[in-house]
Amino acid sequence: MTDTTSLAEKLTAHFKDTISGCETDRDQITLVVSPSHLLSTCEALRDEDDFSFSQLVDLCGVDYSTYGQVDWATEETTATGFSRGRNKTSVSINNEQRFAVVYHLLSIKHNHRLRLRCYLPEENPTLASVTEVWSSANWYEREAYDMFGILFEGHPDLRRLLTDYGFIGHPFRKDFPLEGNVEVRYDPDQERVVYQPVTITNRVLVPRVIRDDHRYIPDEEPSDA
């Protein structure tokens, strides 16, 4: 039995009543936790001797609203260009699980890594802050709030981190326009920086070309000729 399998069994047995899923892929374990059980689960993962996840390595937000959707994709390039007129892929969106917060944990004691995923609804995505469990979550949660608009209850100082104080919207949401909503410029008459409606037009010029990785293409057999 591998360490990953053993850890997955311990996690499932311990949290069977508080998790909605335990997945293992490429030696990476992912626990799916409901928002109501997040804090108690995180505290147990930190404090229980079998787990001892003493370090939060990363925390990020995810927007699943266009998951699996590709406007256009091709396996070949052409000399005539590509058309944006093709039909888009139809994707069913679960508004109750549009957003997610993902936590990456490290157990220095056991040399184990673990991923937690917590789904949130489209309307008012709110989650308890884990800054009291792992202090490193402070800036990570501010970034997720700034980029995705996810609110963390109990955070000591939940302010924008990467955008301006007066910024409107959350740039990593899939419905945020790529060109933004406003732009800034220096006005020599007013002698200050001013905001104005965005004047650029978004254009997609480069197609997504799917190519096989040459490392996994079998070598051609030598010809008899």
Image (cartoon, grey):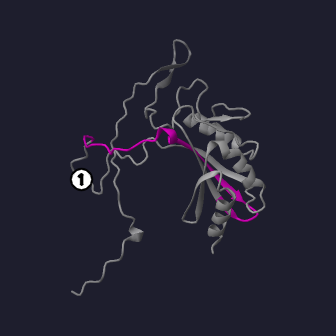
Residue lying farthest top?
189
Q: Quadrant of the N terminus?
A: bottom right
**Magenta span has 186?**
no
Tell me if residue 59 comes above or below residue 182 in the rendering. Answer: below
Q: Residue at x 65, y 53 (%)?
A: 17
Residue topped by disc 1: 78
Depth check, front residue: 147 or 127: 127
Q: Is residue 195 left or right of residue 204?
A: right
Task: For mark 1, give the secondary structure.
Answer: loop
Q: Residue at x 54, y 12 (%)?
A: 190
**Which region shows up in magenta?**
84-113
x, y percent for residue 38: 67, 46
x, y percent for residue 153: 68, 34
Q: Residue at x 68, y 40 (%)?
A: 139
User: Where, by quadrant of the figure, is residue 30 drawn?
Assistant: bottom right
How many circles with numbers are drawn on the protein? 1
Label 1 Cα crowd, 10 Å radius (few <14 / some 14-19 / many 20+):
few
Q: Quadrant of the C terminus?
A: bottom left
**Magenta span has 85?**
yes
Amino acid residing under circle 1: Thr
Q: Is residue 22 left or right of residue 88?
A: right
Residue lying farthest bottom?
224
Q: Is residue 65 left or right of residue 201?
A: right
User: Where, by quadrant of the figure, is residue 131 drawn?
Assistant: top right
x, y percent for residue 14: 69, 59
x, y percent for residue 23: 56, 59
Q: Residue at x 42, y 70 (%)?
A: 215
Depth check, front residue: 50 or 185: 50
Q: Is residue 85 left or right of residue 211?
A: left
